Image: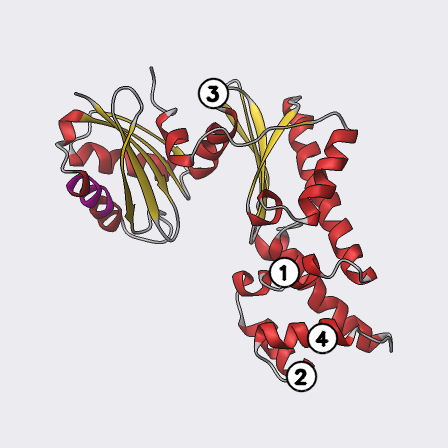
Amino acid sequence: MEYILGVDGGGTKTTATLYNDKMEVLGHFLGGPMNLQVVSGDKVKEVFENMLNHFNLEVKSVKIGVGAAGAGRLEDVEKLKSILKDIGFKKYSVSSDAHIGLLAIHGKSDGMMIISGTGSIGFAVKDSILYRKGGWGHILGDEGSGYFIGLSLGKKLFQSFDRDENFPEKLLQEILKLTNTKDSGEFLKWIYKNDKGEIAKLSSIVLKNTDYRMCQEIIEKAVEDLKDLVLHLKKVTNLNSVGFVGGIIENETIVRKKLLFELKKLSIEFVERKYTNEYGATLLLED
């Protein structure tokens, strides 16, 4: 029997699912990171070897589809292919984690995808060509993301000092509690010493306090930025269907609700995820 492995290789962990030739799930694997910008080739090779050992598989009986973080770069794709070849895989295909995300949403059909979690980015695939918009990181981009929403709340606090305006005491206390700080001075230091993942946690305060005007303004801006991301993709692809990835828009948040409303007004179809990312990785393989 020939087995099929679908692999979702991230910057912090790798997940894999083993299928038989009827695409029935036989088991799952959890391993270390696979982003070659983060770990060495030897470490990535070790992840694949641990995967084979976990499933007690001989490499000659397996074909493997891999979507990996960082593999939007051609050199990293070639490095991953070289690692798979060295291990002994004969049938393999490698692409980015974004590509398998698209396949998980749309299957082999063309379509768009936007991600809004800690950061934000947009992708589309049309006629086997992968398109990207956004994703310039927290200094130059990440509009509409959890980081953007959380940082915007911090900005509102310090802007209120400059403008001699009152900042809602309830929001301030929630900020101090979440960041374990005593006052705005400590919170300022917290902002500058923490990474974007920590700052993104402040978005939860905005999303649950929508009765405050400043939270409404932050949410409206996030929705507008995410809508623009879809429109930028649509402009270059002329596609009309989009799926969502990331906690800000996959979960039932006010941002998701408002974004869906805006897309509906533009007659852009929303598509629910069809498959897991691991299954999406198997779709990289030729029939």
Q: Please tell me whether residue 198 is drawn above or below residue 180 in the rendered image.
A: above
Q: Which of marks 4 and 3 is nearer the N terminus?
A: 3
* Residue labelled with disc 4: 172
Q: Residue 108 carries which label?
A: 3
Q: Earlier in the sequence, mark 3 or mark 2?
A: 3
* Residue labelled with disc 1: 204
Give me the C-alpha separation between circle 1 and circle 4: 13 Å
By secondary structure, the bulk of the magenta-drawn segment is best described as helix
| Circle 2/circle 4 CB separation < 8 Å | no
Whether residue 177 can be seen here: yes
Q: Which of marks 1 and 3 is nearer the N terminus?
A: 3
Give me the C-alpha separation between circle 3 and circle 2: 52 Å
Type of the residue with mark 1: Ser
Q: Earlier in the sequence, mark 1 or mark 4?
A: 4
Pointer 4 local density, CA inside 10 Å: few below 14, some 14–19, many at least 20 = some
Q: What element carries label 4?
A: helix
Q: Earlier in the sequence, mark 2 or mark 4?
A: 4
Pointer 1 local density, CA inside 10 Å: few below 14, some 14–19, many at least 20 = some
* Residue labelled with disc 2: 183
Q: In which quarter of the image is the N terminus?
A: top left
Q: Is mark 1 on a helix, strand or loop?
A: helix
Give me the C-alpha separation between circle 2 and circle 4: 9 Å
The range drawn in magenta is 47-53
Give me the C-alpha separation between circle 1 and circle 2: 19 Å
